[in-house]
Image (spheres, grey):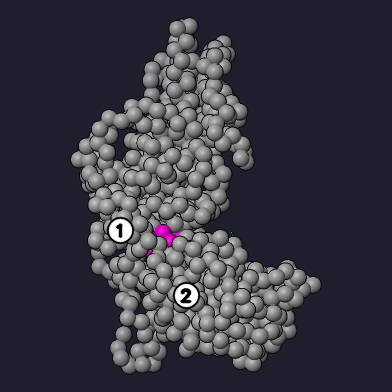
Amino acid sequence: MKKVKADPKGVLTGAHYLDGDFALAEGALAAGCRFFGGYPITPSTETAERFSERIPRVGGIFIQMEDELGSIASLIGAVWGGKKAMTVTSGPGFSLMMENIGLACMMETPLVIANVQRGGPSTGLPTLTGQQDMMQAKFGSHGDYEIIALSPDSPQECFDLTIEAFNLSETYRVPTFIMTDECVGHMHEKVVIPPADEIELVERKWYTGPKEAYLPYKPDKDLVPFMIKAGDGYRFHTTGLTHDERGYPVINAECQKVNVTNIIEKIRKNADKIIKIEEDQIDGAEVVLISYGITSRVAVRAVRLAREAGIKVGTMRLITVWPFPEKRIKELAPKIKAFIIPEVNYGQMVREVERSAAGKTQVFGVPHCGGWVHNPEDILNVIKEAVK
Amino acid sequence: MNDEARQKNPIEHLLRMDRIPHIWCPGCGIGTVVTSFAEALRKSNIELDKIAVVSGIGCTGRVAGYIKLDSFHTTHGRAIPFATGLKLANPELKVVVFSGDGDIFGIGGNHFIHAARRNMDLTVICVNNFNYAMTGGQVAATTPTDANASTAPYGNFEQPFSIPYLADAAGASYVARWTALHLRRVTKSIQEGMDKNGFSLIEVITPCVTLYARRNRLGDGLNLLKYYYDKSEIKHGADTRDLDISYQGKLIVGKFIDRERPNFIDAMNQHMSTVLGDDYELYGRINND
Ligand SMILES: Cc1ncc(C[n+]2csc(CCOP(=O)(O)OP(=O)(O)O)c2C)c(N)n1
Ligand code: SF4
Ligand SMILES: [Mg+2]
């Protein structure tokens, strides 16, 4: 993995007062993203607007595509043309992108998609928050594959995690999602953008060997194949069909096994390196509250009240939501009375916790229909019930 | 490749010979359009390493897999937006979209009109075999009224698109239609399309012997070529409103549109440097990272 410093041209060094959506755009520019194909959708549009304003001064492309089917397709093309590329969307647009997210996985194309979640299903609550696309991020496209998804809980993290998302996506050649939401997207806070030489970027895993020997899908030691771009004389082929190391279609179960296993294992086997979680007061905790994104901010108060009431609550914040930190959950399960998982949906990541805890402890979800965040009291009540 | 081999088959070096035999049926017209394309590549002055081919999904969509250039086999309908990203990311590429009528004008129709409207610098070669062949001969947006298809077993009662009319209205810079009989002209149009600094569309009416022809009892590939021969009429510059195709009816072919208009990148550079002056960084020419 080759690391380089950020190009100062894209880095707006300094302290700013930004909303999460703008911070996503600044993070992308700092990460060297020079292609943005998007389609307007509340509550993500401000990112596209910011990018369209900034990119002409930085050198790159902003294009408002005709729909999200086109946005995601243009991203994959742009990456094979050599650029780093990003789009932002929300539920309805995310749904439209699903088929080509599978193509990006199959072609092992690094790119970043931010989903500023709103309440669904369907058109749902365009202007109000939700965390209802968490499972869609993992399983929304057909077939078996793995992706990476991060969940920022502040505008600062929107900036930081966008850079991280680009780095992860380049390292593993995989689509990487920033699963934020309307609250964080529209929340204004201080965002500190460091000088360019303090921003470390992972360079694309360019192939450098002899041209004749290049095999587009031959996995390297870390299972990630080397990449090239169009126009450099390789005359290579890539396809969404099941393919061999040459990138040629091979329609049988043997090739499927090699191909699909590889795109899955490169993430699963590297999960420990990818996963980032933030823990507090886990040692000796009776219960552990797991949260991500905006809900972590809301849970702070519930946790404080519970601790004041004498309950030993540990917290775990998922910065990486996919791959899911199942190992850590498994480890903690037998030591505690319960996991509590508030989320602004009717029970999504809680299923992962249940699966990982495998009956070794109790698991309480704290569902919310979307449209607003939890009342901390509701979370507190579940904590109290869990320690009864 | 040595000269002798090149003489034997002058386009072999442009094909992925390690993938032959191809999947197309005997008598299928797609291969002949590929030959015309390869011929255009051979004659073209454009550096082959700078040409990329993007296909969608379908019998025609398999073309990308047989052309020995940078080649992308994408998803159904999305070849044009994929190509748009590829071209914009790397403007020195010549990007050719090679796909079927269903792919480009059915599921991908919206992308087509917008790429034409933007005058995106792409060359689109569309094999129009009047049906969705890959999936078994279903009715398409190009199936002539009254023709039979597997999902129009009582005949098609919808009106098809006239591809050149649509391309013209959407703003394409170059529009031509030929049949698989007019191979030399297809080659010439593809060359002209690739040389065009903007959006070009070359429609090639092509026999699908196995499905469209069989289902409509039109005979074999030769019978279809005879139909093209009997019923096609070359009318360069014809009014694109007059190019409808009726079932087994007249086929007006030719080059209909060839005009100049700034392509997407030129328009962007022109506009942005006027508005932003020195703050704007010209794209794709000076500082193309
Ligand atoms: C999203 C999606 N829908 C449907 C299909 C099935 N499908 C594959 S090819 C095809 C039709 C292709 O028709 P056309 O573009 O005319 O190509 P042809 O096979 O006739 O050359 C369809 C419907 C698909 N692959 N993806
Ligand atoms: S089904 Fe039709 S279009 Fe497809 S390969 Fe056979 S003849 Fe050609
Ligand atoms: Mg067809």
Q: CA distance from mark 1 to mark 2?
A: 24 Å
Instruction: Please name the residue shown 49% across and 45% down the image.
Output: A40
Residue A254 lies, in percent from the top left, at: 50, 62
Circle on res. B174 = 2
Q: Which contiguous range is marked in magenta?
A: B82-89
Image quarter in which the C terminus of chain B is found: bottom left
Q: Nearer the viewer, residue B129 or B20?
A: B129
**Residue found farthest to the front:** B274
Q: Is residue B87 magenta?
A: yes
- Looking at the rendered structure, the secondary structure element under dot 1 is loop
Which sits earlier in the primary sequence, circle 1 or circle 2? 2
Q: Is residue A28 magenta?
A: no
Q: Are marks 1 and 2 in contact (CB under 8 Å)?
A: no
Residue B243 lies, in percent from the top left, at: 62, 79
Magenta span main SS? helix
Q: Is residue B60 visible?
A: no
Q: Nearer the viewer, residue A305 or A114?
A: A114
Ligand 1 shown in quarter: bottom right
Q: Residues within 10 Å of mark 1 (few under 14, many from 20)?
A: many
Give above or below for B187 relative to B285. below
Q: Which chain does the numbered disc 1 sit on?
A: B
The amino acid beneath tag 2 is Tyr
| Disc 1 target residue | B283
Residue B60 lies, in percent from the top left, at: 54, 73
Question: Is A28 on the left or on the right of A335, as rendered?
Answer: left
The amino acid beneath tag 1 is Tyr
Instruction: Please name the residue shown 55% across and 28% down the image.
Output: A344
- Looking at the rendered structure, the secondary structure element under dot 2 is strand
**Residue found farthest to the right:** B154
